[in-house]
Amino acid sequence: MIAHARKRAAESGSHAEFLAADAQTHDFPSSTFDMITSRFGVMFFEDPVAAFRNLNRAAQPGTQLLMFSWRDPAENPFMTAAEAGARPLLPGLPEREPNARGQFGFADAARVEHILSESGWQDVVSEKLDVECRFPLSAMDLYVSLMGPVGYAIAQGVDEATRERVIDVVRAAFMEFADGDEIVFTAACWKTAARAA
């Protein structure tokens, strides 16, 4: 992805730079960034306070942090339908733990606001954001086999018969979101903003 981004930037004449690094531990130059944004990536830090402290150190005073994360799994039934359907066929599928590192790790806005405040960010505000999402029904099998915990479990090497059964079961579970030749669902998210001191 980084190579593709670099290629596109060069073709467009952009001077953007791209770096693949762990934002929690990377030694960014101090007071460098004037904007920090993340779309659904911040929930995976091993130590969120340390990560956001590191990002704060790299930010210029007044830098805006803008990030998006998932709200509660109960508000995102599309995101949990695959696991619910596939669990009987994939007994090793991990259970989701509240506040644990992972897709729904930042579902609790009060916890996220505390993490950001503890790591030195100011004026922390979270607001609910609901986004209607659509993709072609014909892409469902690819989606199931590549995305989320079910896709990961399939990629780890289940036998072909199990893979086919999982895809059939999950496809059926997702049909409640079918609208004609599309899958339509609401992504229930948090939009969280903060400012570096």
Image (spheres, grey):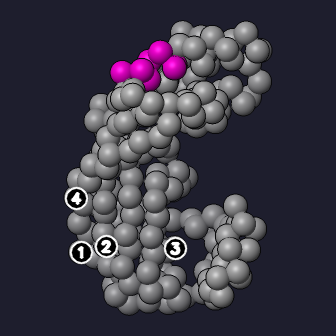
Instruction: Choose mark 4 or mark 2, whichever is in front.
Output: 4
Answer few, some or many: residues within 10 Å of disc 2's Cα (few below 14, many 20 plus, some between 14 and 19).
Answer: many
* Residue linked to disc 4: 127
Magenta highlight: main SS: helix
Instruction: Say which of 146 and 102 sits in front.
Output: 146
Q: Residue at x 35, y 66 (%)?
A: 116
- How far separated are the C-alphas under marks 3 and 2? 15 Å
- How far separated are the C-alphas under marks 4 and 2? 12 Å
The amino acid on which the numbered mark 3 sits, given as a three-letter code, is Asn
Q: Is residue 175 magenta?
A: yes
- How far separated are the C-alphas under marks 2 and 1? 5 Å
* Residue linked to disc 2: 194
* Residue linked to disc 3: 54
The amino acid on which the numbered mark 2 sits, given as a three-letter code, is Ala
Answer few, some or many: residues within 10 Å of disc 1's Cα (few below 14, many 20 plus, some between 14 and 19).
Answer: few
Range drawn in magenta: 170-176
Res 123 → quadrant: bottom left
* Residue linked to disc 1: 123
The amino acid on which the numbered mark 4 sits, given as a three-letter code, is Glu
